[in-house]
Image (cartoon, rainbow, N blue to C red):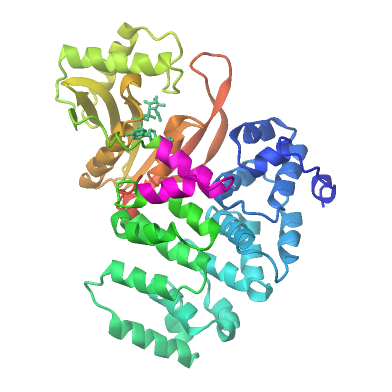
Amino acid sequence: MPDAVSREVPDDPESLLGRLRRGRGDAVRELLQQPADVAADTLVACLCTPADLAPHVRGYAELVLSVQPDLRPWFEWIERLGPDADDATLVYVFNLLGELAQRGHLAADAFLRRYLLHGLHWQSALGQFLSPQLQLDAAAWRTILPRVGDDDLRLHMADRQESAPWEELAATEPRVRRMLDLLRSERDPQRDVHAWSRENYAHAPSSQRRWKVLESLWRADPQAAAPLLFDGLWDATPAYRERCVERCDLSWPGVRARLEGLAAEPGSRVAELARRRLAASPAAATGACPTTTIERLPHPPTERDIADLAALLADAVADGAAVSFLQPLAVDEAAAWWRQTLTNRGNVVLVARANGRIVGSVQLHPAWAPNQPHRGDVAKLLVHREHRRAGLGAQLMRAIEAEARTAGRWLLVLDCRAGGPAERLYERLGWVRVGAIPDYAIDADRKARHATVVFYRDLRRDGGTHGG
Ligand SMILES: CC(C)(COP(=O)(O)OP(=O)(O)OC[C@H]1O[C@@H](n2cnc3c(N)ncnc32)[C@H](O)[C@@H]1OP(=O)(O)O)[C@@H](O)C(=O)NCCC(=O)NCCS
């Protein structure tokens, strides 16, 4: 067991560990600058925390993948979680294991599967296998089946009728056969995914399981998930309530008032999250400026459009954005780059105009490779500083996703500077984070290098429409 785990850690909220437990960016940055063994020990010590770290699961997963610590002390700690382990700890632990397993972390995947077969909180582990990326084979199902109740079995079988080994199991397990027949008889080719989700939601035996159902509905259709997210704002489980606060749609009637109520609760994390959501979307500001339109850039572009695009790029570079160029970027140089880029007619270039002038842009570059006819790269999302934080970036992204879908390019890839505003935007819009590459590029002001984060989006899977 590493020192940092076995050592009594002082409960100092401003220590690296204390800040890391709260998911603070400065702590993550500091951690990544530590020698590899220290970073690994500190991260594992952080993970071995009986607390609600659920809001940081994705960030921790990335840290684990980049620091690559030996997770065995964490696994041992999980094995020791007794019957009195609270729901928040279980949600964090098993969601992180699930997240790591989904991202190909072999040790986490193996532990999760082992734990499912013999662990005390095996039901929490089972919840992870509702994710489409994680599969249980027939042998594992056979082992756990005697312990799995009808509601749970129904939930798993209804969710994955095509891919899981139900037919194979049904040959020897009469209960599976009956359930399979029942589900098939209920099946309607025009299946109402929403009614189905609601039913599974109602049957879910724990808040963790309920969340999985809600999350998959949210990915498929955020509008349909809105009423469930709304209910979740009153949920008795704090971790669940927090996730609903993070994702609820503020334009829904009653949501704002509920968030204001939550924000007034002193000292809780849910209050902090509610305040953040309210601050990011003040009541008066609803979406982008009404005179803003998004359209394809006409070809050939006018000189005024080239001048606007050059000013847009120069503005981003002057602001320190990581968009290929270093400061200072002269407008002429930026204009020359645009002229060159726009000669490639295969690319789709969208522009946002406010009162006719270009204030934002984004591009789709269809992959040239003959073996990737379904893939495209999204590049150079830019919004002029004067028009930021009004939803324009999100609108441009939705519009380029719609272009990609129309063009049959359903697998999209992009990258952005780690820790920048774009990273948060892509996460908020539901893009899937692949990982970070350290020292990828030089900062625009040439003072240091920064990591880049790679994201992808499968438009077949989620329709690419959701976002806050
Ligand atoms: C990244 C970038 C395109 C985002 O553009 P944007 O128009 O500000 O994006 P949005 O308005 O959709 O979202 C940004 C923030 O504004 C908030 N916002 C959206 N609408 C809002 C409103 N009406 N009122 C207040 N805030 C609002 C969002 O919640 C979001 O905040 P969050 O990050 O805390 O979640 C812009 O910052 C930019 O051009 N950066 C420089 C270039 C760059 O880095 N590009 C990425 C290259 S990969």
* Residue 450 x/y as whole percent: 55, 26
Q: Quadrant of residue 313?
A: top left
In the image, residue 49 sits, relative to residue 205, either above or below, namely above
Locate the C terminus and report the quarter of the image it occupies. Answer: top left
**Is residue 131 something one can see in this rendering?**
no
**Which range of residues does the magenta coloring cover?**
256-279
* Residue 43 x/y as whole percent: 70, 44
Ligand 1, seen in the image, is in the quarter at top left
**Is residue 111 something one can see in this rendering?**
yes
Q: Is residue 264 magenta?
A: yes
Write the residue at 84% across / 47% down.
8
Camera-side residue of 434 and 75: 75
Provide the major secondary structure of the magenta segment. Answer: helix
* Residue 122 x/y as whole percent: 62, 72
Q: Is residue 348 magenta?
A: no
How many marks the image carries: the answer is 0
Write the residue at 44% across / 49% down.
261
Camera-side residue of 88 and 326: 88
In the image, residue 427 sits, relative to residue 320, either above or below, namely below
Camera-side residue of 368 and 302: 302
In the image, residue 327 sits, relative to residue 100, either above or below, namely above
Side of 391 relative to 112 (left or right): left
Q: Quadrant of residue 107?
A: bottom right
Side of 442 relative to 51 (left or right): left
Write the residue at 26% across / 32% down.
288
* Residue 126 x/y as whole percent: 55, 70
